[in-house]
Image (cartoon, rainbow, N blue to C red):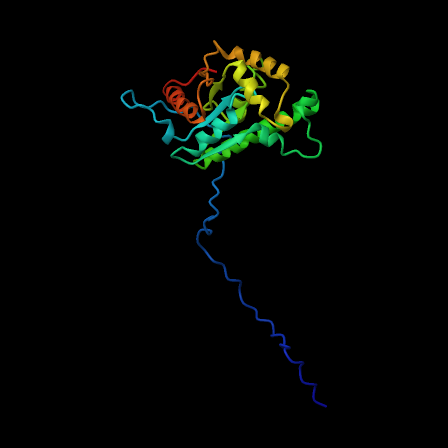
Amino acid sequence: MPPPPPAPGFTAPRPPHHTAPQHTSGPPAPDTTGHVPLPPGGPVAVPAAPPAAAAPDPTNTTLAVLLIGPAGAGKTSVAKYWADHRRVPTAHISLDDVREWVRSGFADPQSGWNDHSEAQYRLARRTCGFAARNFLANGISCILDDAVFPDRPVVGLGGWKRHVGPGLLPVVLLPGLDIVLERNAERTGNRRLTDEEVARIHGRMAGWYGSGLPIIDNSQMDVPQTARVLDDVLARSIASPPQW
């Protein structure tokens, strides 16, 4: 009796075909994702000073900037505006924004500074530092903002220097106390502090005077004016990097 016909759509298996495997030669296909790997242990270096005859142009240079100041100083507004109006790609990295990535279990320093809030602050700073190095390795400038205290050098500037590198250019934004109080009063949510806390932070920030870091008093400046002064300060910092 002949075997039944195969079912429709059925393909009979082919007999085994013993051939040597085919090996292709040549370089692997290039990575077209646009990702540029970080150099091994490559924190940003100190910017090279330009020739004496040439004025440094911070608007057309890849930079890493740390904008320091108390709550209400205008750090975030100035950093965003400065990043938005540069001639080279620039990212704004806000420590507060990164801290608030933690949703459940967020340790709000306003509820009391403790081991949890300290740990989340340190984690956010490391995350910001890695992000900055990643942007810089891909040719994108960055500006970070943080309320760094002069009386905590190991945690503050020392931490940023470890995570980003000695080429980070710190600038202090320090308007008068009355201006800071006024701006803080316009805030909402957990970023609004009590007047007593604002005054305490502002007093500690005054310790930056005499530190050698450039300080901008933007009490009488709007955001675009402050950004222009920031460019002037950065040009001087590139020509003669501050010792910190």
Residue pushed farthest left?
53
Is residue 148 something one can see in this rendering?
Answer: no
Classify the position of the N terminus by image quarter. bottom right
- Viewer-closest of 60 and 182: 182
Q: Is 5 drawn above or below residue 194 in the view shown?
A: below
**Image point 43% across, 28% down: which residue?**
63
Give how far across and how far down residue 8 sits, in percent: 65, 80
Count of number-bearing discs: 0
Q: Position of residue 92 (x, y in %)?
A: 50, 32
From this view, report whether residue 79 is shown above or below residue 216. below
For residue 28, above or below residue 130: below
Residue 86 lies, in percent from the top left, at 40, 33
- Say which of 6 and 115 sits in front: 115
Could you tell me if residue 163 is visible in this image?
yes
Q: Quadrant of residue 118?
A: top right
- Residue at figure coordinates x 54%, y 67% from the top left: 19
Q: Is residue 88 left or right of residue 181?
A: left
| Residue at the (40%, 22%) spot, across then down | 229
Q: Kindly indicate the quadrant of the structure image that contains residue 11.
A: bottom right
Q: Position of 193 compared to 41: left or right?
A: right
Foreground residue, 70 or 153?
70
Residue 122 x/y as whole percent:
62, 25
Which residue extends farthest right?
A: 1
Whether residue 119 sits left or right of residue 172 in the image: it is right
Residue positioned most to the bottom:
1
